[in-house]
Image (tube, rainbow, N blue to C red):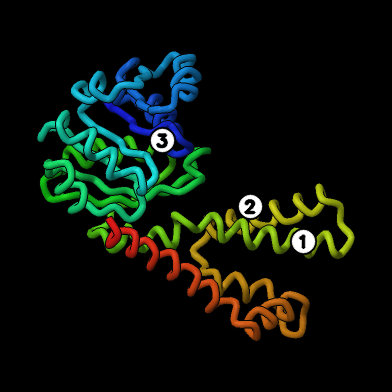
Amino acid sequence: MRVLVIGAGNMGLTYAESMSKSKLLKKKNLMIFDNSPEKTTSLKKISHFEVYDDLDSCLPKADLIFIAVKPYHCEDLFKKLKNGISEDQIIISIMAGVTINTMQEALGIDKIVRAMPNLPAQIGKGVTSYTASKQVSRIELLTIESLLDTTGRSIFVSSEKFIDASTGISGSGPAYVFYFMQSMMEAALKMGFSPNDSKVLVSKTFEGAVDLFNQSDLSPNSWMERVASKGGTTRAALDSMEDNNVKELIKEAAYSAFNRAVELGKEQ
């Protein structure tokens, strides 16, 4: 089996690096294409990749084709792919908002997998939701899942609705966490902590809270009740958040990302 990754940006290179370590791929069975001369020059220094700057040279060799370009590049890319792609090849797209139907019509093939990764994939702690057209077999999906799992965990979802929904939760979610962290760090600085101490206080608090949550069956609400005693400091903070409608604002933010993902699909 040979895999071609199209696009050597952050996520494309993340998947290429991770998949190259998979037992499913032997040495040199991972190809990567990018149209930037600077990018391909630097990539050619990585021995475990076959690097291409010409699609016609690598496209026919691939069994699986990962498309990792920005959605606004898809129209031009599809035109370049259409004449060289075959019905036996499988497309795995991580482009936000570009639907399976759009890809099938543009490329003239049936086997399409649509996936939504997130940024922690760069350190092997990502989560990727994915779904597929009915023409992709169960065996093929298991292979694709194994490759997606090289960046963390993958979750199969029943329809593209959940791909768009996961865009609003896990895809964009790291930015929400960073937003919250930035706010807490700014509060720490205002209280007089140094930048380094502010970073340590906030980052270790998030890390510890997540570990506690993952190592138990308690809900976030249950953990909050354990921390927040009546009339105490934590209760004062949580009451302030409730008074300022923070929970609903976070939900609205997630839905904004979800709705934008749906809009992107309609624009294609």
Whether residue 165 is visible: yes
| Residue 207: mark | 2
Q: CA distance from mark 3 to mark 1?
A: 33 Å
- Residue 225 in the image: x percent, y percent? 62, 76
Whether residue 1 is visible: no
| Residue 12: mark | 3
- Residue 44 in the image: x percent, y percent? 45, 15
Say what amino acid the circle numbered 1 marks.
Glu
Q: In percent of the image, x 37 and y 19: which residue is there?
A: 51
Q: Quadrant of the N terminus?
A: top left
| Residue toward you, 163 or 32 | 32
Say what amino acid the circle numbered 3 marks.
Gly
| Residue toward you, 228 or 142 | 142
- Residue 253 in the image: x percent, y percent? 50, 70
Q: Are marks 3 and 2 in contact (CB under 8 Å)?
A: no
Q: Quadrant of the C terminus?
A: bottom left
- Residue 83 in the image: x percent, y percent? 15, 31
Q: Are marks 1 and 2 in contact (CB under 8 Å)?
A: no
Q: In percent of the image, x 55 and y 56: which residue is there?
A: 175
Q: CA distance from mark 1 to mark 2?
A: 18 Å
Mark before the other along the chain sequence, 3 or 2? 3
Residue identified by numbered label 1: 186
Say what amino acid the circle numbered 2 marks.
Glu
Mark before the other along the chain sequence, 3 or 1? 3
